[in-house]
Image (cartoon, rainbow, N blue to C red):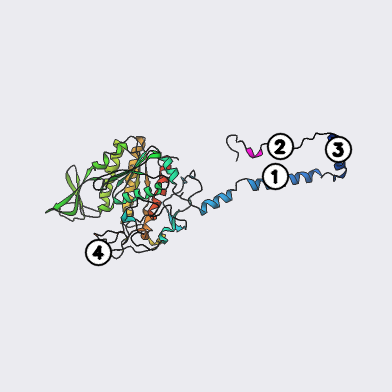
Amino acid sequence: MKPSCPVQDRTHKKDTRHHNHGGGNGGGSAASAAAAAAAAAAPPALPPFLFFALLLATLFTLFMLFSPSPLTIKRDLQQDGSSASASIRPQQDCDLYRGHWVPDFRASSYTNSSCATIPDSKNCFRHGRKDTDFLNWRWKPDGCELPRFDPRAFLGMVRGKTLAFVGDSVARNHMESLLCLLSQEETPVDVFKDSEDRFRTWYFRRHEFTLKILWSKFLVMAKEEVINGSSTGTFSLNLNEVDGEWAREVPTVDIAVVSSAHWFFRKLYLYEQKSLVGCVYCNEPNVTSYGPEHAVRMSFRAALDHINGCSQRTTTLLRTFSPAHFENGTWDTGGACARTGPYEEGEIDLGGSEWGFRKVQMEEMERAKVVGRERGKRFGAVDVTQAMLMRPDGHPGEHWGNKWMRGYNDCVHWCLPGPIDVWNDFLMAALRLEGGMNS
């Protein structure tokens, strides 16, 4: 394919210093004699048809040697899911979130030595994890490739912007992965931390990019029941009122990644307009009983409606449910996650509660997208559920260093580095496809 605009090729510029144009005494007669001798010795001319055949063969050979080969490009992309250039965009007609994990023995983009911001509880190698095979996999969508995260290109996409993760400690885990990946390109400045270390802000000066975590358990207003000064773990949720701690920040945010779910697996009283409308895990007389999926749906509906109504500039991505992998018990009854490799696609259950949470989240995102489209706003998803259902090997397990909870395993959060880093491959692709952003 010819370039769209003229390109000067300096390698073909004529250099007259390498050509002798004759001169000197007697040069003309000597040259004439040499030419006559050469003409006498020259072989007979080639027949015209043979001359043209040789010319065509030469041109074809040169074309094959110096033109780009589509077969080579295709093979290179198939073998290297990271793509050779940040300009390669994910295919719009391919579902990046349906696929499987394939072996990949390239080193992680960072280590627990090269990233200074890994929190202690996610630094699995520091706390004794010995196996490293869980790092040697990459996500392969069915029918296409997922470009590998490129920190330089990502920072170019978000230059001058603010990106906020809104949600619980798993949202924080996602931000920490992104922070490590970006810190390989530019060292961020820690500019804010609240007294409980739940709200954090980092700033990348060279790119004028701000990265935040806005903590919220349920996305809506929640109050924990306290009896005799002790917390009970039971919450009352006001489904009509979003949590103001994160909501007030939305007008200053260009990109919001919204997520939550793990706090909904407990006894919850649900209120609308200060009236009790139902309960999760309560089984009380005269109170409508709901599953946790309903509470998740209504909380996300309130959160996305708030963003649609108050923000004029925010691109919103909903990150779907990230499953836990406790085996032989729950977190408080000896459950553990000691596997060292991913599941095959046939080993996961796409009809379980994890998929139910994803279903209601995706439905609420699509609902918000329809409303937002009329207002010129963008909504999309970072759909991690299937990929992470297959990764029971990526959690800290016993290697999380919590001296106050010895004997308990963390099978909810994710080691850094680890499988969670693919969330940022997904995030970069989503910003290009859903957010219309380019590096």
* Residues at circles 4 and 2 in contact by the CB criterion of under 8 Å: no
Which comes sooner in the sequence, label 4 or label 1? 1
Q: Secondary structure at mark 3?
A: helix
Residue 386, visible in the rendered structure: no
- Residue ranking furthest to the front: 25
Distance from the alpha carbon under mark 4 to that under mark 3: 104 Å
Residue 294 lies within the magenta run: no
> Residue 385 appears at what percent x and percent y?
36, 53
Residue behind mark 3: 30
> Residue 331 appears at what percent x and percent y?
26, 60
Give the camera-side residue of 283 and 254: 254
Q: Secondary structure at mark 2?
A: helix
- 106 vs 64, left or right, is left
Residue behind mark 2: 17
Is 104 placed above or below 182 here? below
Residue behind mark 1: 59
**Residue 333 — which label?**
4
